[in-house]
Image: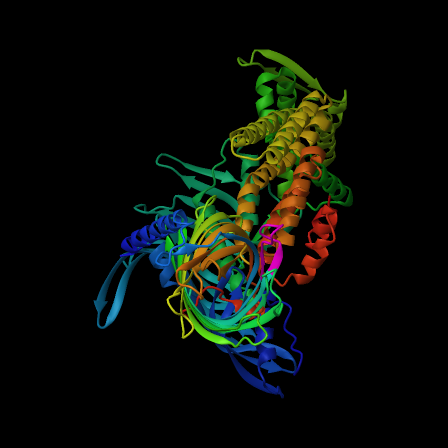
């Protein structure tokens, strides 16, 4: 059997299922052999039934020939809703090649069926997304259509999204069209896929474009929006670019555009519809790319090329950014921890100092951390190198950088004021609009948060401890009450040794509770209380075990009997059997254990006694059926409880004391 | 039916007691036409009864009695009268019915202090017995029919064995005193009445050999061991003269034991005879 290597790009789950399948096939792989797979397959989030053929070439496995994978569940559909999918296409030497069709459905059914031409039909409603087109060696070729439709009663009710793009070896060509139920975006590319000319957005019922993105060889010159009364033209970037670079028109680009638009027009923040449509289209392509990438070598992203300004980060800036990212992560966790702490949220209502400190954290979070967080986000999204840092930073703090002293309002009516002051003079360091200033400001925030959080953590812990103590005490009292009630209710019914044991349990528990209440050290008290909580639960179980003893003794007496026919009376008499065992039980073990409980009981051994009592009963029931002559002989020689427990194989438990 | 039987048995016992006391009242008169009652002798019997289970339905009945009687100087236990060995194989028909068949060797000692004859002679018997038990409320009652074929001889050197048949019926009850049934730890009282009739060539007129009336107090130690003790009054015609009645007061002490020598696995189930 040969070891099969598989291209690294294929998802590990797929390798797993395929490998196990191939290894199990009793085939001699010589040269090229086309093989077939039919069975379950997982591709990313998609798990379904697949059917395909593949080649094994010198240890490599390549998909070759038709490919089908689908999933739909009638049961799920009838119960609630079904999420179905179907991928149909073909591969050539591991590349998706030829005609492909992807369908994704989310359907519900009204559960009414009809029989038509010997088939049951079931009307469904929901959404269906279809993507179809040609692929040449993994790259889209020709016209690709993607559409999302709303389905009502098994009919297409309306189209929610539609995109038509013409490709040549994966590069978009000529014009394209993307539409949702209201808007239609039309645009065109140069031969190399670079956006060019006007990309126009039309809304239902208008003949003139309502939003126009004007590209010039990939550079977005401006966005023109039309309202009922006026046409507004907004420049986006600053021209000319000192350095520029070509990137794909994807979400990152839209984010860059959005940021630049904000620089130019601080008041206008709403994203235009063009961006919305482009973003949706990018999502659909990304989804299909995910599936194809998991299967073979492919590059299925619409490579709309655009040109953006480039502000490369130097070494110093990069190291500053690293520090900022790190400090932000720590501080953010800390401040979120404080702000979401339930104990502190309660405590701040009743305690001024806590309220003050809590509000300091809220203030630092809002004035320092939130804007810094955005910078960190831009960096991780790869946007930061395409915007001017100075513009970005000044826009993040539009009213100027925060002061080092933070004013806090307090009280129900917000009419008390206090000021928090961290390191004096620190604010001087963060007045510039560069990354160094941001780093200084982040450091200040981190340090201030640290100092406040220490105090708050203690307060929270104290509050938590108090809450815990109150709950614990309630629990302990409830346990003690329950135990006392049980013992008191048994006074009438039990023999004196049993009662003595029970009274002692009651007394032990009361003594422990007294010790608990006299403990003054808060930490110790809670720890001790928790121990008592467990201990009292065990004591309660022990009470039940002792309570059951008379019944158990009777049950044992009943089963340790044989019916014997007596010829002199001609009657059947019950004869006690295995008397040595029952005597050891009744005369030695039970009195011993009750005595132990009545004199030696504490939290450490309560569980042991319970276990011994429970096991002893079970053992007694077993011994009635077992061959016990040897045991009886040994029992005859001893009255020692420990030895008897050992003979009954119960001493292991005893040792656990 | 059961009640009727019970009532008539009860009456029988009362009547028997009355009659026996009545005859004692006639003591002292010596007339050819009227019965003579000898002075009652006092005796003491120590009896062991063993019923040894040997199979599901069979048991070995082994009894040994030591019977003493008065001498001039000592009442009750003055001298040995008989040593009595009774054995049989019993068959358990059901919980309440069983049968036995076996033999007896009784060793009779000459208790006539003035006699010059042999001191000891044997007596042989073949016997069979049919016993029926029934529960009545908390008590049990028993009917026992015992038939014995008996060879006896006198103490004289030239004495020949004579053959007689004995016909015995005993009614007995066991009434628990401190319990609702006969079980270990139970003290019970047991009234008995037994009539022993005899026949044979040697028996002329003396058909009532013995009438025994006993009151016994017993205690069940465990299902395999019981003890009892009681006092018996008995009277019967002497073989020599039908008009002559002998009388006895006997103290009786009994040990009843019933071991089971079967292997454990054969004992189960212990109580189902009709399987």
> What residue range appears in magenta?
B66-80
Give the quadrant of residue A303: bottom right
The answer to whether any part of residue A424 appears in the image is yes
Left or right for A569, reference B156 = left
Q: Is residue A574 above or below residue A138?
A: above
Q: Residue at x 59, y 28 (%)?
A: A480
For the rendered model, the colour scheme is rainbow
Judge by depth and name the residue closer to the eye, A55 or A481: A481
Judge by depth and name the residue closer to the eye, A317 or A577: A577
Q: Residue at x 62, y 70 (%)?
A: B118
Q: Is residue B67 magenta?
A: yes
Quadrant the N terminus of chain A occupies: bottom right
Judge by depth and name the residue closer to the eye, A299 or A373: A373
Quadrant the C terminus of chain A occupies: top right
Q: Is residue A109 magenta?
A: no
The answer to whether any part of residue A127 appears in the image is no
Left or right for A156, reference A466 = left
Residue A368 placement (x, y as % from top left): 65, 29
Residue A418 placement (x, y as % from top left): 65, 14
Judge by depth and name the residue closer to the eye, A199 or A648: A648
Residue A489 placement (x, y as % from top left): 51, 30
Would you say the magenta stretch is mainly helix, strand or loop?
loop
Furthest residue to the front?
A: B31
Give the quadrant of residue A57: bottom right
Residue A651 placement (x, y as % from top left): 72, 50
Q: Is residue B275 above or below residue A487?
A: below
Q: Total of numbered circles in the picture?
A: 0
């Amino acid at each position: 059997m040969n070891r099969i290597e598989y291209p690294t790009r294929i998802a590990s789950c797929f390798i797993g299922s395929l490998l196990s399948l191939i290894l199990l096939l009793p085939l001699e792989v010589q040269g090229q052999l086309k093989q077939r797979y039919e069975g379950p397959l997982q591709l990313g989030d998609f798990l379904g039934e697949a059917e395909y053929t593949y080649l094994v070439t010198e240890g490599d496995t390549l998909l070759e020939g038709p490919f089908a994978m689908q999933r739909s569940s009638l049961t799920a559909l009838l119960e609630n809703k079904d999420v179905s999918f179907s991928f149909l296409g073909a591969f050539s030497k591991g590349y998706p090649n030829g005609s492909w069709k992807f369908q994704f459905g989310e359907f519900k059914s009204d559960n009414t069926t009809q029989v038509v031409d010997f088939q049951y039909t079931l009307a469904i409603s929901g959404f269906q997304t279809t993507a179809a087109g040609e692929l040449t060696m993994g790259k889209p070729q020709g016209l690709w259509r993607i559409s999302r439709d709303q389905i009502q009663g098994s009919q297409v009710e309306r189209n929610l999204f539609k995109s038509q793009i013409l490709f040549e070896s994966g590069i978009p060509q000529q014009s394209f069209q993307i539409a949702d139920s209201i808007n239609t975006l039309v645009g065109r590319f140069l031969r190399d896929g670079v956006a060019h000319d006007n990309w126009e957005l039309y809304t239902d019922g208008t003949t003139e474009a309502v939003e126009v993105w004007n590209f010039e060889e990939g550079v977005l010159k401006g966005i023109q929006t039309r309202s009922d009364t006026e046409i507004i033209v907004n420049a986006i970037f600053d021209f000319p670019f000192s350095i520029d670079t070509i990137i794909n028109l994807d979400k990152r680009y839209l984010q860059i555009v959005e940021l630049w638009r904000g620089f130019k027009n601080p008041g206008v923040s709403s994203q235009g519809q063009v961006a919305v449509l482009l973003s949706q289209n990018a999502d659909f392509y990304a989804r299909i790319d995910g599936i194809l990438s998991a299967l073979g070598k492919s590059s299925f992203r619409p490579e709309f090329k655009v040109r953006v300004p480039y502000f490369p980060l130097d070494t110093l800036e990069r190291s500053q950014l690293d520090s900022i990212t790190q400090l932000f992560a720590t501080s953010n966790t800390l401040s979120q921890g404080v702000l979401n702490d339930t104990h502190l949220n309660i405590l701040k209502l009743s305690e001024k100092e806590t309220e003050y400190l809590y509000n300091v954290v809220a203030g630092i979070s809002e004035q320092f951390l939130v804007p810094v967080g955005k910078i960190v986000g831009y960096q991780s999204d790869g946007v930061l190198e395409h915007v001017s840092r100075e513009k970005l930073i000044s826009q993040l703090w539009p009213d100027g950088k925060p002061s080092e002293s933070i004013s806090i309002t307090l009280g129900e009516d917000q009419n008390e004021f206090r000021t928090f002051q961290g390191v004096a003079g620190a604010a001087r360091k963060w007045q510039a609009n560069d990354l160094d200033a941001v780093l200084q400001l982040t450091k200040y925030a981190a340090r201030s948060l640290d100092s406040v959080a220490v105090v708050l953590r203690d307060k929270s812990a104290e509050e938590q401890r108090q809450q815990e103590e109150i709950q614990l005490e309630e629990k302990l009292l409830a346990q003690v009450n329950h135990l006392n009630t049980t013992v008191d209710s048994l006074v009438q019914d039990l023999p004196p040794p049993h009662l003595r044991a029970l009274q002692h349990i009651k007394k032990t528990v009361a003594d422990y509770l007294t010790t608990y209440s006299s403990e003054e050290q808060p930490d110790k008290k809670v720890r001790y209380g928790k121990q008592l909580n467990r201990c009292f639960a065990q004591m309660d179980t022990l009470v039940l075990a002792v309570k059951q003893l008379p019944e158990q003794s009777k049950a044992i007496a009943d089963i340790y009997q044989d019916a014997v026919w007596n010829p002199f009376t001609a009657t059947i008499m019950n004869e006690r059997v295995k008397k040595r065992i029952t005597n050891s039980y009744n005369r030695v073990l039970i009195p011993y254990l009750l005595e132990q409980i009545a004199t030696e009981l504490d939290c450490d051994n309560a569980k042991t006694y319970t276990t011994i009592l429970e096991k002893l009963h079970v053992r007694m029931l077993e011994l009635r059926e077992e061959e016990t002559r040897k045991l009886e002989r040994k029992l005859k020689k001893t009255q020692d409880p420990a030895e008897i427990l050992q003979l009954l194989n119960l001493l292991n438990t005893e040792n656990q004391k | 039916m059961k009640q009727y039987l019970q009532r008539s048995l009860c009456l029988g016992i009362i009547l028997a007691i009355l009659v026996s006391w009545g005859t004692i009242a006639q003591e002292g008169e010596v007339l050819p036409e009227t019965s003579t009652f000898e002075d009652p002798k006092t005796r003491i019997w120590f009896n062991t009864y063993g019923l040894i289970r040997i199979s599901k339905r069979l048991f070995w009945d082994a009894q040994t009695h030591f019977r003493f009687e008065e001498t001039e100087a000592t009442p009750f236990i003055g001298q040995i009268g008989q040593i009595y060995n009774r054995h049989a194989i019993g068959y358990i028909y059901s919980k309440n019915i069983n049968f036995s068949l076996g033999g007896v060797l009784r060793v009779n000692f000459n208790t006539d202090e003035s006699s010059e004859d042999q001191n000891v002679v044997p007596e042989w018997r073949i016997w069979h017995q049919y016993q029926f038990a029934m529960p009545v409320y908390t008590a049990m009652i028993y009917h026992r029919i015992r038939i014995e074929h008996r060879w006896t001889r006198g103490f004289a050197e030239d004495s020949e064995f004579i053959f007689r048949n004995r016909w015995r019926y005993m009614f007995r009850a066991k009434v628990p005193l401190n319990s609702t049934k006969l079980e270990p730890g139970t003290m019970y009282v047991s009234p008995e009445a037994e009539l022993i009739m005899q026949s044979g060539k040697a028996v002329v007129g003396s058909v009532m050999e013995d009438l025994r009336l006993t009151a016994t107090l017993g205690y069940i130690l465990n299902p395999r061991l019981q003890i009892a003790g009681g006092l018996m009054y008995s009277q019967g015609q002497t073989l020599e003269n039908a008009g002559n009645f002998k009388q006895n007061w006997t103290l009786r002490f009994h040990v009843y034991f019933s071991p089971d020598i079967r292997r454990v696995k054969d004992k189960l189930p212990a109580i189902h005879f009709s399987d």
